[in-house]
Every structure is written in structure tokens, then in C-alpha cells.
Image: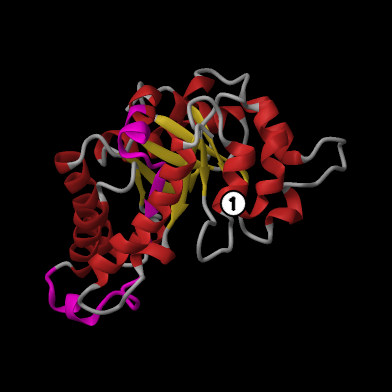
Amino acid sequence: MTTQEIVAQIHKKKSFLCIGLDVDIKKIPEHLLAEEDPIFAFNKAIIDATHHLCVAYKPNTAFYEAYGLKGWSALEKTISYLNTNHPEIFTIADAKRGDIGNTSTMYAKAFFEDLGFDSVTVAPYMGRDSVEPFLQFENKHTILLALTSNKGAFDFQTDTSKGAPLYTSVLKTSKSWHNAQNLMYVIGATKASYLGEIRKVVPDSFFLVPGVGAQGGNLSEVCKYGLNSQVGLLINSSRGIIYASKETDFATAAATAAQELQLQMKSILDAGY
């Protein structure tokens, strides 16, 4: 999927919402446990209820790998369902991969070719040759961890022992990598005050912004500092949407929660941001 196609969907739906499909089988409604594949049944219901309100879905692969072959099968079914029924929606494998070049190539093939995701999250710590294999795939996006939403981000990412914060070095260095135009960046919503400076370094890039909702991130603050001429934001909400209810009305409740965010986004877009 091209960046232009993502932008077109944002303006068509008046939304830059990404819904995280982080499925914990202990948290899904009990009646789904009778299904042959409870995880996929849950995801399908969420997708059917919310696809018109969002422009992206982001399964965190840990929530599928934890259940072994059954979990991986549910992930395959989920991405296949999205690609078949909603090919206009941007899909993100939140896998946080990254390794030496030949290993990264295999990770990229797994998510881009076998599963058919549009993008994958990647850790930058091992540098250029661990990331560039992901960047070789046409119309696929690599979403680099830059400044994350967790408290531990301050352990390393904001370290200034070499002058500029480490996350700034990640941003600046990554711009020199081959096919860097295929890069997006993870910037946590709980770090909204940093977004203004980050935008100066990567003014044209898309940011995947987790942390709105359950983690306490503020949508207005993120938009104030993070929006660019193409919108340039994918705001992720996971638990606040998919676990809005544990009853049989869970999908309807998820749609209500998603629409609340979508309407805020529509208001921001309509105002010309």
C-alpha cells in the first residue's frame, strides 16, 4: 500500500485511527470460547463492527505467538480476512523484529510475502543492515521504534550522554538508509511534548502513535505537535476499544468506543488542523 493510498483513506473516512488487535483469550467474552477459533471469531467481529471507522489494524504478534500454532493460525486468518474483505485498510504487524541482514530478510518475507501485511514494526538497535532488508519491499512500510510510550523509554531513548537524545540520532541516521522513504516511526502518545522537535527532524514521515486511551495519551496534544501536511499520524488504540465490553455486545461496544475517537479526529480534520 502506498502512502498516498493511506492518506486518501484518512480523508475519505475522516479518521486516522488504528485499532490494535491484541487479543488476550482471558479477556474476550466467554461465549466465544465455544467457537472453533475464539481469537479469530473475536477479531472478525471487531473488524466487521469497526472497519468503517479506522484506516489501520495492528495485531501485536506476541498475543498470537503465545498460543502456539493455534495463535499463529488465528493471525493468518485475521490478515487474510482483512486483505480479502478490506484491502483498503493498512495492516501493521507489530512484531518489533530486527536482526542481522539475512535474518531480517527472512522476517520481512514472513510478514510481507507469506502473511501479506503492509508494514511491520522494527527495532533499530542493530543499525542499518538490520533494517534495510525490510525496506527493499515495494509498497511495504517499515515502522521504526523511535520514542516509545512505556516508562522504560527514559532508560535509553532519551539519553543525552552524546549530546542529542538517542531517539534523535535514530531518526537522523535512519534518513540516510536505502529506501528510507518507506520508513514510518513509532512515537508514543505519552511523549506528545517531544513531537514538535521530532517533526523538525522527519517532517514528512508518518508516525504510528500508541498510548491513546488506556495508557493515558492525549489525542489533542498529539495532533497539536504531530500533524503534518498529509496528516502523518496513525493513532492506535487497543484495549480501550476491543475490550469496551466483555458481554455479547462487545463488538457494538467496540464500535461505539472507536466512533468516539473517530469523531474527535473528524473534528480536527474538518477544522483544517
Is residue 21 visible in this depiction of the protein?
A: no
Image position, residue 249 (x, y; %)? 22, 73
Is residue 155 visible in this depiction of the protein?
A: yes
Q: Secondary structure at mark 1?
A: helix
Q: Neighbour class for label 1 at 10 Å: few (<14), some, many (≥20)?
A: many
Q: Is residue 9 magenta?
A: yes
User: Which quarter of the picture shows residue 12?
Assistant: top left
Q: Is residue 233 magenta?
A: no
Up-down: is 253 above or below 152? Answer: below
Image position, residue 190 (x, y; %)? 63, 55
Looking at the image, which is closer to me, 69 or 144?
A: 144
Per the rendered image, the range of residues in magenta is 8-36
Dividing the image into 4 quarters, which one contains the N terminus? top left
Residue holding disc 1:
189
User: Which quarter of the picture shows residue 136?
Assistant: top left
Up-down: is 232 above or below 257? Answer: above
User: Which quarter of the picture shows residue 203?
Assistant: top right
The answer to whether residue 142 is left or right of residue 197 is left
Looking at the image, which is closer to me, 246 or 183?
A: 246
Dividing the image into 4 quarters, which one contains the C terminus? top right
Q: Residue at x 60, y 28 (%)?
A: 128
How are the colours assigned in the image? secondary structure
Q: Hey, what amino acid is under mark 1?
A: Ala
Q: Residue at x 19, y 58 (%)?
A: 44
Image position, residue 53 (x, y; %)? 30, 48
The answer to whether residue 23 is left or right of residue 39 is right
The residue lying furthest to the front in this view is 271
Q: Residue at x 70, y 39 (%)?
A: 167
Q: Residue at x 15, y 40 (%)?
A: 84
Looking at the image, which is closer to me, 243 or 78?
A: 243
